[in-house]
Image (tube, rainbow, N blue to C red):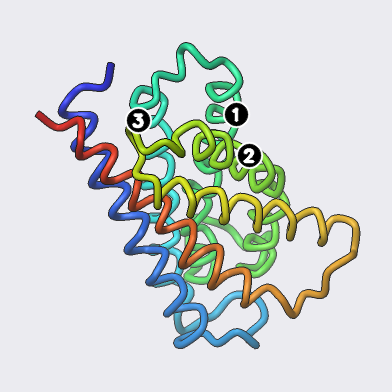
Amino acid sequence: MITTAEARLGRNMAILVVATAILQLLIGFVLIGPDTEGYSNDWGLLNGVVTFANSFGQVAVLIFAMKLFDMDNNPLLRLLGTIAIIGTTISTTIAISPAAHAAGGWTGTSFTPTQILDMDGAITYGTWFVFPVWVLLVSLQERGGNVLPSWGSLAGIGASILILVVNLGFLFSLLPETIVPFVWIVGGVILYPTFVFGMSRAFASKIN
């Protein structure tokens, strides 16, 4: 059973995820630009801070969702959620590393900021198969609207299927990289944040 304090924090972290997802789009497309490759010296630190906040919020949402949806009685969801927590935690801890390396100091000079960005994507790649499956199964389980609003579950189903199809398409070289902006906007800024906002309402329903 989720406590009121946990539900309140879960709600706040879910709202943080939604807000930072929108900020990530603005930073990526407006400030940095979609054609920029690698680390941005001008906006890299801001992007890293926002990414850190987004990933931190996602870790919190995953942890508290375990209790929200009583996943102790669903070992598959608990397993997938735990793997997703680990992968997202890695993204959280590495988010500001490119900016730290760009600034110099104790972080060393063995890797460039762009190489660290690439390593983050390489190390956590499998997370973006496991995490969407978790979102899909939760959304299917909750499509009746008992805890998660029905519109939230529909958004979760759409986001997870889109991300899974695209990742598989890239894995087997079936899709062009030109579709990345479309996927980022539809899946990462519209559908998934809508699912997470639905999670915020689910958490809110457990606050006494």
Looking at the picture, tell me which residue is in the foreground, 107 or 139.
139
- In this view, the residue farthest toward the left is 208
Looking at the picture, tell me which residue is in the foreground, 160 or 78.
160
Which residue is disc 3 drawn over?
64
How many numbered discs, if any? Answer: 3
Name which residue type carries label 1: Leu
Please report contact status of discs 1 and 3: CB closer than 8 Å, yes or no.
Answer: no
Q: Identify the residue at horizontal 46%, vertical 39% (top origin).
A: 143
Q: Identify the residue at horizontal 56%, vertical 48% (top origin).
A: 157
Earlier along the polypeptide chain: callout 1 or callout 3? 3
Q: Quadrant of residue 15?
A: bottom left
Which residue is disc 2 drawn over?
133
> From what the image shows, is residue 123 above or below residue 34?
above
**Cα separation between marks 2 and 3:** 18 Å
Q: Is residue 82 left or right of residue 2?
A: right
Callout 3 secondary element: helix
- In this view, the residue farthest toward the front is 144
> From what the image shows, is residue 68 above or below residue 168?
above
Q: Is residue 192 left or right of residue 162?
A: left
Residue 80, disc? 1
The mark closer to the camera, 2 or 3, is 2
Q: Position of residue 3 (x, y in %)?
A: 20, 22
Q: Identify the residue at horizontal 54%, vertical 64% (top origin).
A: 98
Earlier along the polypeptide chain: callout 2 or callout 1? 1
Residue 149, disc? none
Please report contact status of discs 2 and 1: CB closer than 8 Å, yes or no.
Answer: yes
Please report contact status of discs 2 and 3: CB closer than 8 Å, yes or no.
Answer: no
**Cα separation between marks 1 and 3:** 14 Å
Q: Residues within 10 Å of mark 2 (few under 14, many from 20)?
A: many
Name which residue type carries label 3: Phe
